[in-house]
Amino acid sequence: MMSTATNRTTTPPNNLEAEKTVLGALLIDPDVILKVLPILSASDFYDPVYRVVFEACTKLHDDRQPLDFVTVANELKSDAKIESLGGSAFLANLAESVPTASNAASYARIVHQKSLQRALIAVGQRISKLGYEEGSDSAELVERSHLEVLSLSHAADQSAPETLADISVRRYDQVAELQSGNNPAALRSVKTGFSNIDYYFNGLAAGSLTVIAARPSMGKTSLAVNMAMNAATGERKNVLFFSLEMAKEEISDRITASLLGVSTWQMQKGDMTDEQVGQLGAVIDTVSDLPLFIDDDPDSTISNIRAKAIRHQLEHGLDLLIVDYLQLIEPPPGKSRENRVQEVSAISRGLKKLAKELHAPVIALSQLSRAVENRPKCIPHLADLRDSGTIEQDADNVLMLWREGYYEEDCDQPDRTTVFIRKNRQGPTAAPELVFDQEKMSFSPLDRSHSDSGSD
């Protein structure tokens, strides 16, 4: 009994009967390969002989060759192991054991599931070995552990094509829900809290990448913090804010000071009235239960951001990810340094992939180049995005902040800020306006009627 139990626990998970059935189905119906290829790869097979047979089948398919007993046997004729098992007779036996090929996809999923279980065991063993490494930084070891688990979760995420009919029917139901207005949750997006901006986007869609760009000190961090607070308070959305430039205490102080109605500078130097100090506890109570998380980890690699975002989503849920800001994200460690344009291009692509992986909107702040200041009025355009031309390609939405008072202190409305919507994948471009309170580092709509209408 002890020996049986030991064997059961040490034999890696597998289902040889399912592996055999998949191969037999391929041999009796070559079209089956179109059903199993999105599910299986050769590495999923536990039996090395079955793995070799599957590799031969996929190679014939890739080479646009017919898939049958003769072609597969010919492909395997140099394999001594297959020949020792009987060659063509071995393949015929595989086919004879399968009465029908109709359930091949179901058996393929079983094979894939067992492969993932074996991979999970292997990941656990590799993570265990990391714990014994001497001289390695603990934070680095933890990140490597995260990446091991994330690579496995990515392998488990199968995305298969859908017919246009299936997609259209699902979308019809969703649009009908939206049109009825009876279910606000049907709008699977996150609102920024600025109605004259949300008017053009109908909220930020799941899987979208929105870039907010501006020159330094124009207020892009303040706008992102406002949007984070609006999402967390108004809709109780779970927000994760990666601050790569400012400490999390600075972000917290901005939020607290704004709610108190004082400047951050006043609060930080203790220059508040007794009444304002008395309100401080109430303000902290107000924000204490908000689902807003701030991370200022100095490890600003895209892999670390991805690992933390996915872990946060698993532990708390994640409706909105904000990264401040894109040019401070570092390329992966250990890789040769490319030129800066290529690095930023890789980072923007990584953020877009992360948005799709999280199925949540991502807001990334970005610097604008100095070139914007070489033209009349300094109004920004897409070409002014700093370090990369691919940011505008990867982003679904691009918002650019411009304020006349930034350049001309004596203008009539120094706090009036135009938000140029330079790219909107699902809607029109426009130029809604906000008011920037420079003392409180906070934005508000220009006026009530303008906010409600959604007009420029």
Image: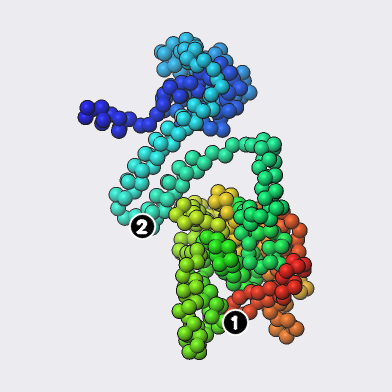
Q: Is residue 317 above or below residue 32?
A: below
Q: Residues within 10 Å of mark 2 (few under 14, many from 20)?
A: few
Q: Residue lying farthest front? A: 182
Tell me which residue sits at (70%, 81%) in the image: 414
Q: Residue at image x 46%, y 24%?
A: 19
85 w.r.t. 161: above or below:
above
Residue 152: x, y in percent? 45, 42
Q: Quadrant of the C terminus?
A: bottom right
Q: Which mark is residue 439?
A: 1
Residue 312 pos. (x, y %): 47, 56
**Mark 2 lies on residue:** 137
169 shown above or below 179: above
Q: Amino acid at mark 1?
A: Glu
- Measured as percent of width and height from the top left, residue 69 is found at 54, 13
Which residue in the rendered view is the most extreme toward the left?
Answer: 2
Q: Secondary structure at mark 1?
A: loop
Q: Residue at x 47, y 44 (%)?
A: 153
